[in-house]
Each structure stands twice: as C-alpha cells, then as structure tokens.
Amino acid sequence: MRNGILGKLPLGWVFILLAIQVISLQAVAQQQPAAQRNGMLILGSADRNTLVERVEIGYRLFAASPSFDYIVVSGGCAAHQSRICEASEMKELLVAKGVPAEIIFEEEKSKTTVQNYTYSRLLRKADGTKVIRPGDKLYVVSNHWHAIPVAARFTANDGVTAVYHIEGGILPKNTDKVNYTNIFDPEVKSGEYVAKALWPMVGAGFTVENKKKREHTTYRLINDLVYVESTGKSGSGSVEKTTQALPALPAAWAGEVDAAYFNSSDKKVYIFKGTEYARFSPEAKTLDAGYPKPLTDLVKNLPTHWHNGYLDAAFFHPKSKAVFLFKGEEYLQVPAGQNKGAGEPQPISTLVGDWPFAWGSGNLDAADYNSRENKVYLFRGKEFVVISLEGSMKVEPGYPKNIEVAWPESILGKK
C-alpha cells in the first residue's frame, strides 16, 4: 500500500494499518513448509478500469514469484448494473499474459466483497476438492483496503495463512472502515458467517406430488436445514431440521447434498453427494436397501470428466421421462431408469433461452420441477429463475428474483 494513502488518513487509522502491515510482513518472512500450497485471490470490480488494474497487480505478483498452485478470480456478472462478467474477464486477461489457464479458477457469483470471501471459500474443483484449503498460503490481491479484512478472516477462521497484497491510491470515504463491511470478526466462526451471509442459498431441492391428496410438498435444502412448503396450505412454509423434514437422509449427508429430484414415475426421491447417489420413498425413514450407490450405477457411459460427481443440480421431467443433470457450465439429459446411457454434455445456455446475463455461464446450486405448474425452478446464489416448459425452455419475464426464506431464529438464533 502506498504511503500516500496513509498521509490522508486519521491518525488512528494509520496505527491500525501499520500494525496489520507489520503482521503481514512477518507472515511473508516466515519459512514455508515444503508441502504448503501457494494461492492467489484477486478481488474483482464492476468497474472495468479498476478490474484491469487489479489483474495487473495480480500478474505482477505472479511474475515476481511464479510458484502459484492456483489463482482464484472472484467477481460475478452484472454487479451494480454493470455489463461485464468479472471472473471470466479477469481469466482472459491473465491467460493473455501467459498465466496457465489450468491454474485459474473462476468464482462468478459474487457481487460484493462479503460474497467474494464467502463464495471463494466454498469454491470447488471439478473433482469436488476445495480450491482454497487449510494450510495454504493465500495472497488476497486488490487496489483497495477491502483485501485486509478478507485476508484477516481467512487467517483467523479458516486455517489459511493469508496476507493482503495491495497497490493503489484510492482515497477512503469518511464513512469507510479498515474492517470493510465488518468482514473480520474472529469471534464469529466462518461456517456461521457464511451461513448468515449467503442465507437462503438453496443447495438442492425437489417437489413431491401427491395426486390423491392433490397436494405438492416442496423441499429446499439450505445448509443442514430444510425449508418445507405444501401447496394449498396458507402459511405452510417452515424451516425444519433435516432429521425432522427428511428422516431418511443419512446423518452424514445433512448439509452435504449436491443435488436432488423427485421421480414421479417410480415415486422415489433421488439425492446426490460426491460420487454417490441414494434413493428413498418420500414418507420413508430410511434409504432404500442397498443405497448409497456409485453415480456410475445410475448413468451409463457417464462422461469421464463427470465421474468425480459433485453435481450442481438435477430435475426429472415427466413428459420426456428424462433426468436433467447439471455440472458447471454443462448439462446432461439422461433417460430415467437404472443405468441408462447419457448423451453428450451440452452448454446450459443451449438448453434455456433468454439465459440471464447476470448468471454467467451456469454453475447452478439447485433445480426443481413443479408438475402442478409445469415449470422448473433454477437456483443460483441467493437468486432463482422460473423456466416455463410450454414450448421451448425460456426464463419467464421478471427473473432472476431473490429467494425469500426468513432466517430461522428459533433454530439458529439471531442473525
């Protein structure tokens, strides 16, 4: 950080910044264990000039010490009404400078600094392993002091040796704090912090239809809780513990389900976790016998780069008798049934017309088909879209919208 900024700050700020810098320099000087991985997190910006400047800073750091195992570029599309996709633009700029594409990982959901931290912390590779892991040395890069609390939270709460790397001369506003948007609080564990920051991000969902009772019950899995809502029952939506809402779900799977769907043909719920899937009846208290099973038992000729599992979303379409599976930027359409062959993966953008620019290239969190409406709900971050299945799949006007589920204070305490 340039000294020019310090000269314009209140004296209290100067001491705080200098103290943090000393800590950072001490961390840099420490001898690294041989097995320690080096990573970089470049914080994006909706302003393209600022974005380019931050990429330049990151590249200079990379060029000075080209031993980085990974670089995370963090920033979503259309943040603050912009017309850029931050992560993809940052990756393109770095690759053009000679940075190997295979070490660059895009986090393209965040629209704020808080989300830069939370989504980057959750970011996984295709094989399901987290990109940023405990024991890593992580450089948080920007031209703004918001990198300071992000690095501090990673260090204090995530077992990561994180240091900030800042260049630039952006003057602070009178209301700005060194602890930008109160990101750093060592008393708040990161799991709790992320849960509050991203609530109510849906990790998986499905809707069970009961034609005899003319009811549909929707289940939205949010962390290790489940939001349950039944049609035709006013005010029926409630957040429940997983053991109460879905007693058949194994305890080790609570909060870890990647995707789910209800098959209205065999009246079974299918859930996915890592390289496995399981099946159960909606009213059951245990899984069907013999489950969990490998994902490859469900889908024949699964593409090689899908073998590691960790699906993003899934839904069953009763008219075509097909299951749609989503992973990253791709989807597969698979005939329903045991060990059916999969076709070739296709870009999600070719499946859904009018794909929202703000949703980048895909990377969904959940999907759900509602037979009563003949519509598909797709979830990404804290937003959702509704897809009409009348004719070709298209996003209905007015979407994306924010997911509306009240914080369950009776279960989790005050937010």
Image (cartoon, grey):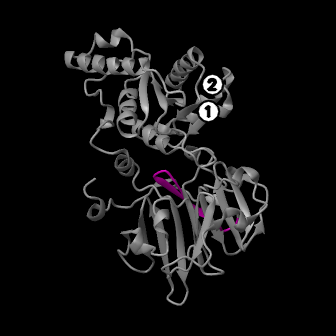
Local SS, label 1? strand
Q: Nearer the viewer, mark 2 or mark 1?
A: 1
Residue 116 coordinates in the image, percent (x, y): 45, 37
246 versus 163 height, above or below: below
Residue 131 position by quadrant: top right
Q: What's the residue type where badge 2 is placed?
A: Leu
- The magenta region covers 378-391
The residue singled out by tag 2 in the image is 94
Residue 134 coordinates in the image, percent (x, y): 46, 39
The residue singled out by tag 1 in the image is 104
- Upstream in the sequence, badge 2 or badge 1? 2
Q: Residue at x 54, y 69 (%)?
A: 206
Query: Closer to the camera, 25 or 206?
Result: 25
Alpha carbon distance from label 2 to label 1: 9 Å
Q: Residue at x 51, y 86 (%)?
A: 214
Q: Residue at x 38, y 11 (%)?
A: 2
